[in-house]
């Protein structure tokens, strides 16, 4: 009977809770109380990034398959996950600059700048810039390069519109997907038609705006959190810290969806 109990699936074994709870290994002497929070928050971010990659892949399949309702559901989930990521900044900001600096030196050259999963999210969103992964290990660079060579979520949306009967510029649809998409007036004309005559497709495009706004909101909160914690100091990974993060602000992912706002 005890043998059956040990082999039975449990909450603990299914979620590998023991392994999970052994992944937090503070380096500071003592250790400093706040280092545990710092580790758990960032490990949680990595789990959410993993889920975002998982959800974006499914959203792309739904879009490219023309499944409006499922695409809306998945895109809505992505936006909700982003809201959770933003909310986690509130927890991190309960740590004062003095509390962070008590263990910052132990981080050495490690930095959020080195998050391979966030770079993968950026590639799925359409970023096409070899510099974004140049500081990462070769195998990771290869993985990100592979993601950047195929459809971004925007390309999947354009395929969706094509399946709905909209005629899109050939040079946009057939372009090398490893090259960054550039906002296109002809695509914007199509998007205006979508909003005026196709409520379902318009809802999908608005979900993408939600996601774009969510990414920008997360970037802004991240910048301000870093600024209030380390001011204008260099980042631990060698980046310029706040200066680098601030350069990523107010740069929408789906520019065409913002350009058409003034034409309604």
Image (spheres, grey):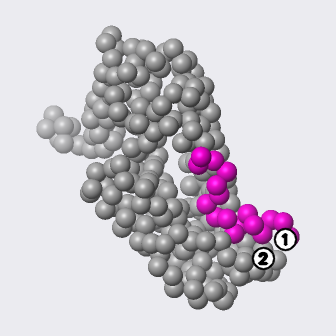
Q: Position of residue 75 (x, y in %)?
A: 59, 61
Q: Position of residue 198 (x, y in %)?
A: 75, 79
Image mark for residue 263: 1
User: For the residue carrying disc 2, how many other residues have a C-alpha within 10 Å: few (<14), some (14-19), or many (20+)?
Assistant: some
Rendered residue at 68%/60% (across/down): 209
Q: Nearer the viewer, residue 77 or 26?
A: 26
Q: Nearer the viewer, residue 53 or 231?
A: 231
> Looking at the image, is mark 1 or mark 2 nearer the viewer?
1
Q: Is residue 150 left or right of residue 63?
A: left
Rendered residue at 39%/43% (across/down): 114
Secondary structure type for disc 1: helix
Secondary structure type for disc 2: helix
Q: Nearer the viewer, residue 111 or 152?
A: 111
Q: For residue 261: magenta?
A: yes
Mark closest to the chain's N terminus, 1 or 2:
2
Over which residues does the magenta segment extend? 247-264
Q: Nearer the viewer, residue 126 or 49?
A: 126
- Mark pair 1, 2: CA separation: 8 Å
Contact between labelled residues 2 and 1, with CB atoms less than 8 Å apart: yes
Reading the image, the residue beneath label 2 is 192
In the rendered image, the residue lying farthest to the left is 3
Rendered residue at 61%/71% (across/down): 182
Quadrant where the image shows the N terminus: top left
Q: Position of residue 89 (x, y in %)?
A: 57, 33
Give the vertical position of 119 relative to 47 (above or below): below
Give the vertical position of 228 relative to 119 (above or below): above
Give the vertical position of 100 relative to 60 (above or below): above
Q: Is residue 43 left or right of residue 87?
A: left
Q: For residue 192: magenta?
A: no
Give the vertical position of 91 relative to 136 (above or below): above
User: For the residue carrying disc 1, how many other residues have a C-alpha within 10 Å: few (<14), some (14-19), or many (20+)?
Assistant: few
């Amino acid at each position: 009977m005890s043998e059956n109990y040990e082999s039975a699936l449990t909450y603990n074994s299914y979620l590998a809770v023991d392994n999970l709870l052994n992944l937090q290994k503070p380096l500071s002497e003592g250790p400093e109380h706040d280092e545990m929070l710092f580790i758990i928050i960032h490990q949680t971010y990595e789990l959410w990034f993993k889920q975002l990659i998982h959800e974006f892949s499914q959203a792309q399949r739904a879009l490219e398959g023309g499944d409006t309702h499922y695409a809306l559901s998945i895109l809505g989930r992505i936006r909700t996950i982003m809201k959770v990521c933003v909310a986690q900044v509130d927890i991190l900001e309960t740590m004062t600059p003095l509390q962070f600096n008590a263990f910052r030196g132990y981080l050495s050259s490690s930095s959020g700048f080195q998050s391979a999963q966030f770079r993968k999210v950026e590639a799925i969103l359409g970023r096409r810039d070899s510099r974004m992964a140049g500081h990462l290990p070769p195998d990771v660079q290869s993985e990100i390069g592979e993601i950047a060579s195929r459809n971004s979520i925007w390309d999947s949306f354009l395929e969706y519109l094509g399946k709905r009967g909209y005629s899109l510029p050939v040079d946009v649809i057939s372009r090398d997907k490893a090259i960054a998409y550039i906002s296109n007036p002809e695509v914007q004309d199509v998007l205006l038609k979508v909003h005026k005559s196709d409520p379902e497709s318009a809802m999908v495009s608005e979900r993408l705006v939600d996601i774009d706004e969510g990414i920008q909101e997360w970037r802004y909160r991240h910048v301000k959190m870093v600024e209030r914690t380390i001011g204008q100091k260099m980042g631990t990974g060698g980046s310029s810290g706040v200066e680098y993060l601030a350069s990523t602000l107010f740069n929408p992912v789906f520019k065409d969806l913002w350009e058409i706002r003034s034409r309604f």
